[in-house]
Amino acid sequence: MTAIQRNLCVLFADVSGSTRLYEKLGDAEALRAIGKCLERMQRAVLAYKGRVIKTIGDEIMAVFDSAEAAMLAASDMQQGIDDLPPLAGTKMAIRVGFHFGPAIDDNNDVFGDTVNVAARMAGLAKAGQIITTESSVNLMSELLRQSTRDIDALTVKGKEIDIRVHEVIWQEHAELTMKSGSIAPSATNEARLRLRHGASELLLGAERPAVSLGRDASCDIVIRDTSASRNHGKIERRRDKFVLVDISTNGTYVSFQGEPEFVLKREEAILRSRGRIVFGHAWKSDADDMVEFVVES
């Protein structure tokens, strides 16, 4: 299918507090719990004739032909997760954001400003919330608009004017305690990623959201290993997560502390906890040209 530009509603949803789930439940139990959430989220997408674009870790990206379908699917997602029984005393929760607008659709992925705005909406949402834009709400029927409420006008990077943001009220008796501006992320809880390469350290966060990796001198972290590609990959901040993206020839080898090493080949992975990244080959005990990472929250 040739890439085309058309109007779509892009939706992002992810499991809230997944890092704490791994710490509290252990890897195997946390993976099973997140898997159940993803299954219910995917079923909601299909129920409203949406299309799942990708899942990465605990996150799902989907598209719909209308803002109404996205809102109904988002509400079903929230209800489905809310119906799950607590696991070891932990109540599962997700956060959802969506936005309708022009996007480039090549069947396997979706690109453009609409995707960025939708991701921003999901980043603003708290556990159990659905956040969207006023322009998306205005495309809905009067009945559905009555289940939303205006929150505030927020500045979004790359936009000349502020965007008005609305919350979708999916619970019949939800307590509407959120006040204007309270969806802004708390600076004290900002996720950061510390990278160590040799004697150098880099800190990724809101001020520095991405870093490039490879043998080319223009990369932020220059890898000397000849098995690495000139432009091997990148690490980028997506809301409160850090995603490692491989675009290399030989692959990127990743290991989380205490877990087996795995390889990415033209794939992505969410970095969690702490671990190491090796470029173009599996880790060797005498390897020194690697990147160590620690997720700080």
Image (spheres, rainbow, N blue to C red):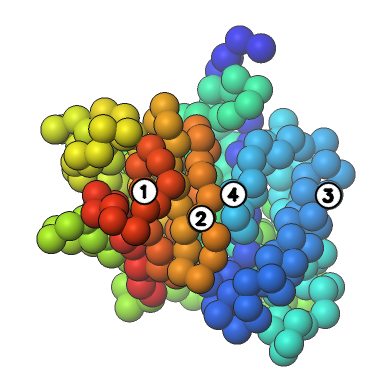
Q: Position of residue 283 (x, y in %)?
A: 39, 52
Identify the element where label 1 is drawn.
strand
Residue 289 in the figure: left or right of residue 234: left
Q: Quadrant of the C terminus?
A: bottom left
Q: Residues within 10 Å of mark 3 (few under 14, many from 20)?
A: some
Q: Residue furthest bottom?
A: 89
Q: Quadrant of the N terminus?
A: top right
Please give the name of the residue rendered at 74% of the width and 67% of the height, measured from the top-left corner. 32
Q: Residue 31 occupies which quadrant of the picture?
A: bottom right
- Could you say which disc has been placed on residue 206 in the image? none
Say which residue label 4 marks: 56
The residue most toward the right is 47
Give the residue drawn at x 82%, y 74%.
84
Instruction: Say which amino acid is labelled 3.
Output: Arg
Please tell me whether mark 3 or mark 1 is closer to you in this view. Answer: 1
Work out whether mark 2 precedes mark 1 in sequence or the reverse, and give the earlier one: 2
Residue pointed to by mark 2? 261
Could you tell me residue 180's position as x and y percent?
45, 70
Q: Secondary structure at mark 2?
A: loop
User: Dot 1 corresponds to which residue?
Assistant: 278
Mark 2 or 4, nearer chain start: 4
Instruction: Tell me the amino acid under the disc marked 1.
Output: Val
Q: Secondary structure at mark 4?
A: strand
For image coordinates 58% across by 70% down, the residue present is 18
Query: Are the residues at dot 2 and dot 1 in contact (C-beta closer than 8 Å)?
Result: yes
Task: Give whichever of discs 3 and 1 has the lower sequence position.
Answer: 3
| For marks 3 and 2 on the same chain, the one whose residue lies earlier in the sequence | 3
